[in-house]
């Protein structure tokens, strides 16, 4: 098994145990782009948009890419779980007797296509892939949690696309007192009812 997949498995296991239970902003709803004025989106709402995937992907699988085609299938699967509503997954995909969730390629892609324009999803590269069912079969479909202490540094709008930079601090630090351990620049495109993640680049 590749080292990257081992890291993902361990991360998923830890999240399932609730070892990172102090979730910050990760349950935020999508900003109201339907207002017709994307620039009315607040800094807080922009941070909400990136904290969800930042919490879902960590370590060797961090949320970093110049275009979505660089995201691995395992990373895309974790993002699918991150962006999905758990109750909907239970309703649509869980077998009541076994407690197993079955996620087909079509089901996963229907969610991912709301957030990424271009990506490549290969189910066979996902840890819980079941060849007999040609689907991902798992009993774990939730458990994301974690803390982040972000500070929005700058942002620039170009039509419906916003590019913004975020500094991340240790949780006990503030922008005034601490030194950021990471800086990332994101590019997000707003459309009617949602957003596309175009890039997330670590500086």
Image (cartoon, helix red, strand yellow):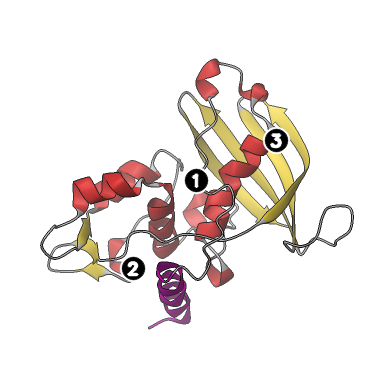
- Residue drawn at the location 35% of the way across and 56% of the way down: 121
Q: Say which label, 2 or 3, has the lower sequence index.
A: 3
Work out whether 192 lies above or below 163: above
Q: Is residue 101 visible?
A: yes
> Which residues are drawn in magenta?
1-17
Q: Say which label, 3 or 1, has the lower sequence index.
A: 1
- Residue drawn at the location 71% of the way across and 41% of the way down: 164
- How many other residues sit within 10 Å of disc 1, few (<14), some (14-19) or many (≥20)? some
104 or 68, nearer to the observer: 104
| Residue 43: image location, x then y, percent | 70, 35
Q: Are marks 2 and 3 in contact (CB under 8 Å)?
A: no
Question: In which quadrant is the N terminus drawn?
Answer: bottom left
Q: Are marks 1 and 2 in contact (CB under 8 Å)?
A: no
Q: Which mark is residue 10?
A: none
Q: Which residue is mark 2?
A: 125
Quarter of the figure with residue 110: top left
Q: Which residue is mark 1?
A: 27
Residue 154 inside the magenta-drawn segment: no
Question: In which quadrant is the C terminus drawn?
Answer: bottom right
Q: Which mark is residue 43?
A: 3
- Residue drawn at the location 50% of the way across and 59% of the way down: 56
Distance of label 2 from label 3 (alpha carbons): 36 Å
Distance of label 1 from label 2 (alpha carbons): 28 Å
- Residue drawn at the location 39% of the way across and 61% of the way down: 73
| Residue 163: image location, x then y, percent | 69, 38
């Amino acid at each position: 098994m590749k080292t990257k997949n081992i890291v993902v498995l361990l991360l998923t296991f830890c999240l399932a145990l609730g070892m990172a239970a102090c979730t910050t902003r990760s349950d935020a709803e999508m900003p109201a782009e339907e207002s017709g004025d994307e620039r009315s989106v607040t800094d807080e709402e922009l941070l909400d948009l990136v904290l969800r995937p930042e919490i879902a992907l960590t370590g060797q699988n961090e949320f970093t890419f110049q275009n979505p085609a660089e995201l691995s299938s395992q990373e895309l699967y974790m993002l699918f779980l991150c962006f999905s509503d758990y109750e909907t997954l239970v309703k649509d995909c869980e077998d009541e007797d076994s407690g197993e969730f079955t996620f087909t390629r079509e089901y996963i892609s229907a969610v991912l296509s709301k957030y990424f324009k271009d990506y490549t999803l290969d189910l066979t590269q996902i840890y819980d892939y079941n060849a007999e069912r040609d689907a991902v079969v798992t009993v774990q479909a939730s458990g994301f949690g974690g803390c982040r202490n972000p500070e929005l540094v700058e942002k620039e709008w170009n039509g419906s696309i916003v590019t913004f930079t975020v500094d991340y601090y240790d949780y006990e630090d503030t922008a005034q007192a601490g030194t950021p351990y990471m800086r990332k620049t994101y590019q997000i495109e707003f459309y009617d009812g949602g957003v596309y993640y175009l890039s997330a680049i670590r500086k």
